[in-house]
Image: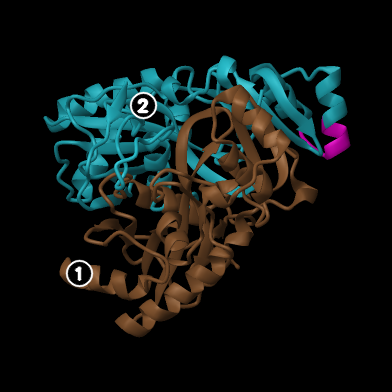
Chain colours: A brown, B cyan
Amino acid sequence: MIARRVTHPSIQIIPLAGLPEIAPGDDLSRLIAEAVKKQDLRVAEGDLFVVAQKIVSKAEGRIIRLDSIQPSKRAEQWAAEYQKDARVIELVLSEASRIVRMERGVIVAETQHGFVCANAGVDVSNAPEGTAILLPDDADRSARALQTRLEENFGVHVAVIISDSFGRPWREGLVNVALGVAGIAPLVDYRGKRDASGKTLQATVIARADELAAAAELVMGKIDRVPVAIVRGVASREESGSGRDLIRPAATDIFR
Amino acid sequence: MIARRVTHPSIQIIPLAGLPEIAPGDDLSRLIAEAVKKQDLRVAEGDLFVVAQKIVSKAEGRIIRLDSIQPSKRAEQWAAEYQKDARVIELVLSEASRIVRMERGVIVAETQHGFVCANAGVDVSNAPEGTAILLPDDADRSARALQTRLEENFGVHVAVIISDSFGRPWREGLVNVALGVAGIAPLVDYRGKRDASGKTLQATVIARADELAAAAELVMGKIDRVPVAIVRGVASREESGSGRDLIRPAATDIFR
C-alpha cells in the first residue's frame, strides 16, 4: 500500500530501555510490554514500534552454531585471503541468492528475501560466542505477529517496523532501513500532487518506512541495549503495507 | 570529525511552517528566525536545523533560465528518445563530473561535489516556470553560514544540515540525506566498542547526519512548504564535521 501524503505535527522518538538479553523462544511482545510499563510510558493510538532485527532473529531462534558449518572450498579460499572465519563465509554464501559484489574482503549479496546488503544479513556482532545470527525468515510476518500482540496488549492501533543497518553505495556509514513492516504504509506518493508553484510533481515517492527506521536508530544504542524505539503518532488505522514494497523489482532496477 | 557514541534521550522533530516562497538574495537565516518567532518556538542549545536544499539553492540564486541553454547533440538525442526537455538534459550533463548510469530515461551521475544522485541534482520541480535549480555551490559553506547567523540570532549552539532527497540502488523510494553539515558530527563510530556480549564491534559506523536528514523529512512537506525542521537537542558544542565526510572516496568504493 502506498499512502497519499499525511501532514504531521511534531514527531517524538522515544528509546525503550530495560529489555533483557533475548534468547530463542522469548516472547518479544511481552518483554516490550513490560519495558513500556517499567519506563512508565503510555502507548498512544498510532504509535510505531521500531524493533531491531537482531532481537527478532534471536527470539525466533535464527542463531546458527558455527561448529555445525562445513565450509566449501570457495569459502575457505576467500576466508584465507581476507583473514575471515571460513564458516561465516560459508553461511553468507548459503544465505545469498545472488552475489552483487565480492571483492576486497567485502561481500554484498541479495538475500532470499530480496534485500541487498553486506554478508547477506549474516551477523556475528552481538551474537552469542561461536554463533552467527541470520535475518528473520519473514520479517513482515514477524512484524505482523508483533503488531497483533502489541495491539491486544495496549488496546490501540500500533504499527511495527523491523529494522536493520545497511550500507549504501557511494556514501559512508550505515543507515537503518525497514525489513519488515506492519500497520503503516512504507511509501508516500507525492506523484500527481502539485508543488507550491502549481506544477505537477513528477517522480517523488518517499520511502517513509526507511526514514522512520533511520529516525529510530538515532535513539537506539548498539551498545546500550536499546533495541526498540517508539515513534509517536505516525501510523493511522487505515494504513497497511509490507517491507516488500521497499524492494525494487529486478525489472526496474538499473543497478542489477 | 567522527563522534564517539552519544546516548540520547527522546528526540523531537518539529516542522517549521510559515516560510515564504524563497527568491535569490533572500536572507534565509532571518526568514527562519521570523518563522521560529511566529510559531512561538524557543530554540534550545543543541537544536539542529535541517534545511531543504531547494530553498538554499533558491536563496543563493542557483536558478538557471532554460532558454539560456543550448543543448548538445547528445542531449537532443536522449531528450527525443525519452520525451524530456533537451535543455534540462544539457544542464544535467554539464553538472555531471561522471555518468554512473544513463539508461531507460534515467540519469544517475556524480556531481562536481562528489554526490551521486539522479540528474546530477538538477531539479525542475518546485522551480519557477522555465527554470531549473542546481545544488548549492558548496553546501557545507551554506550550512556554516546559516549556523553562524542562527547562533548569533538565538545565542545558543545550533547545528545545520542541508538536505536533499536521493534515490538508492535496489530499494524503492527516495530518502533524505545530508549534503552540507555544520556543527554536528555526520558519522558515529562504534568501532572498537564492545557489544552487549563483550565482543568488539567490527565495522559499525553510522551515518547519523543522513539519519537526521531522513528523520526531518518525516515532517517536511513537499507540497505544504515546510522546508525546515528542527531536531531538538542532538548537537553538542564539541562537535564539528562536513558533508564531505559522508562521501565515500573513490579508492574504497566498490560500486564505482
Amino acid type at mark 1: Leu
Question: Residue at 47% of width from left, 67% of height from top?
Answer: A60
Crowd rating for badge 1 (residues with CA inside 10 Å; few <14, some 14–19, many 20+)? few
Judging from the image, what secondary structure is the residue with disc 1 in? loop
Q: Give the range drawn in magenta.
A: B79-85
Circles 1 and 2 on the same subunit:
no
Mark 2 belongs to chain: B
Per the image, the residue denoted by label 1 is A41
The residue closer to the viewer here, A123 or B128, is A123
Amino acid type at mark 2: Val
Per the image, the residue denoted by label 2 is B181
The disc label shown at residue A194, or none:
none
Q: Quadrant of the N terminus of chain A?
A: bottom right
| Residue B169 in view | no
Q: Where is residue A216 in the image (x, y as percent from the top left)?
A: 36, 52
Q: Position of residue B98 (x, y in %)?
A: 68, 18
Q: Distance between the residues labelled 1 and 2?
A: 34 Å
